[in-house]
Image (tube, rainbow, N blue to C red):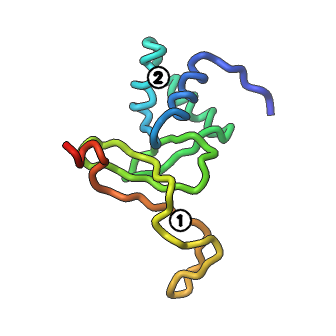
């Protein structure tokens, strides 16, 4: 595998995803990265997301039929989707006790699980 040179665009996009409170859409990555790089284009974001995924620095998250992206290495976690502000948050606790290798009622052998909770985030619930 050949080394890929670092560019300001790649560094900014990677930082945007690392600093995010949850997975981001391509449009949100573009919007946040443009705060540092006003001339950044959507094609560069797509190319960079593809490269960072191939390098396993980020990974895609399928949520409600949309592909979002988040930084890798955050361990086991789930997501919360606020229906008012449309933001997605990372939940660092697991609401289920389904260990890998466990057997779910009916004979289903659990290898992994993903959970998305829906409702109002704290800011929207307070407003």
Task: Give x and y (percent) for residue 101.
Answer: 65, 75
Residue assigned mark 1: 113
Quarter of the rendering containing residue 76:
bottom right
> Tag 1, which secondary structure?
loop
Task: Give x and y (percent) for residue 124.
Answer: 24, 44
The crowd level at tag 1 (other Cα within 10 Å; few <14, some 14-19, many 20+) is: few
Q: Residue at x 45, y 45 (%)?
A: 67
Residue assigned mark 2: 33
Q: Which comes before the other along the chain, label 2 or label 1?
A: 2
Picture layout, residue 118 above or below residue 4: below
Give the position of the C terminus as an image quadrant: top left
Residue in front for this viewpoint, 108 or 92 = 92
Give the residue at the far right of this rendering: 1
Kindly indicate whether the residue at mark 1 contacts the one at mark 2 (C-beta within 8 angstroms).
no
Q: How many marks?
A: 2
Residue in front for this viewpoint, 127 or 30 = 127
Task: Give x and y (percent) for residue 8.
Answer: 60, 16
Q: Residue at x 26, y 49 (%)?
A: 83
Q: Residue at x 44, y 53 (%)?
A: 79
Q: Residue at x 45, y 61 (%)?
A: 115
Tag of residue 10 = none
Specify whether 86 is left or right of 65: left
Give the residue at the far left of this rendering: 127
The crowd level at tag 2 (other Cα within 10 Å; few <14, some 14-19, many 20+) is: many
Specify whether 49 is left or right of 63: right
Give the residue at the far bottom of this rendering: 106
Picture layout, residue 105 above or below residue 96: below
Give the position of the N terminus as an image quadrant: top right
> Tag 2, which secondary structure?
helix
């Amino acid at each position: 595998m050949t080394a890929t040179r670092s560019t300001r665009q790649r560094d900014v996009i990677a930082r945007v995803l690392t600093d995010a409170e949850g997975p981001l859409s391509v449009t949100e990555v573009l919007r946040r990265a443009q705060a540092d790089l006003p001339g950044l284009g959507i094609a560069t974001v797509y190319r960079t997301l593809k490269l960072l995924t191939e390098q396993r620095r980020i990974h895609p998250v399928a949520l409600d039929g949309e592909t979002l992206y988040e930084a890798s290495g955050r361990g086991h976690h789930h997501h919360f989707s606020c229906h008012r502000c449309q933001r997605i948050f990372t939940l660092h606790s697991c609401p289920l006790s389904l260990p890998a290798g466990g057997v779910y009622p009916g004979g289903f052998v659990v290898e992994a699980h993903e959970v998305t909770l829906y409702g109002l985030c704290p800011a929207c619930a307070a407003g």
